[in-house]
Image (cartoon, grey):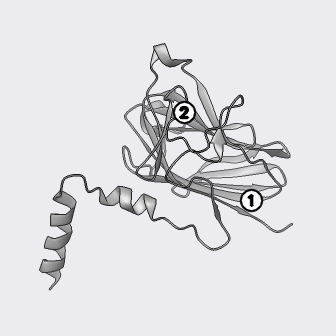
Amino acid sequence: MKQKHLALILLLAALPGLNLFAADAKMFKPEPGYISLFNGHDLTGWGYVTNNCDGKTDSSDGRYTAKDGLLVVNPHQAERGPRLRQLSTTKQFSGDFILRLEFRAAVNADSGIFICGPQLQCRDYLVAGPYKELKKYKPQDWNEIEVVVKNHVAYCTCNGEVLEAALKIPETGPIGLEADRDQMEYRHLRLKMLPK
């Protein structure tokens, strides 16, 4: 019976146009108490300082795309705008909270997560650093970032390993993602407010 089940999974995965990983990202439901920051379909709730991306699947300069349940940071195209871009939630967050997300970095990709303003580097860590000594980071695979904010200080981990133990953040601000170098994919972006 197990062999038939495995054969069915392999058959489904081999079908053209069927991406089981994309289906997982689209069907993701946050844990109890968490709100989803990305709907998996478009960039609603996100935008640049000068315009929001509600209802759009691509940002105006093509740096960000919503596709198959993923929020993709696309490589820079000089003719479409500046290299460094920051897409942020249109909602501001304050107080204590937990932010969780998963990311997959292309080789030497460079991005970042803005937590109410300050940036936590999110990259192909073992190549691009600054956290080159991580033991649990999985190159070109899915990794989880968790940020626990208490009293305006963020404790940040990647797959349970400490990135920043005391990143100071302002009282309020959005969550943002940086577009810098090469492709980065994000999924399962969610946030939980903590009681005071």
Q: Residue at x 40, y 62 (%)?
A: 24
Residue 5 place in picture, x, y as percent? 18, 78
Q: Specify the label residue 112 is tagged with.
A: none
Residue 71 place in picture, x, y as percent? 49, 45
Q: Which residue is mark 2?
A: 59
Q: Report the side of 64 relative to 22 (left or right).
A: right
Q: Which residue is mark 1?
A: 97
Q: Residue at x 20, y 64 (%)?
A: 12
> Looking at the image, which is closer to me, 162 or 87?
87
Sequence-wise, which precedes: disc 1 or disc 2? 2
Q: Residue at x 66, y 32 (%)?
A: 48
> Looking at the image, which is closer to me, 149 or 40?
40
> Looking at the image, which is closer to me, 35 or 166?
35
Q: Is residue 157 above or below residue 86?
A: below
Q: Is residue 80 above or below residue 102?
A: above
Secondary element under disc 2, as helix, strand or loop, is loop
The residue type indicated by label 2 comes to Ser
Q: Report the side of 13 relative to 92 (left or right).
A: left
> Looking at the image, which is closer to me, 173 or 16?
16
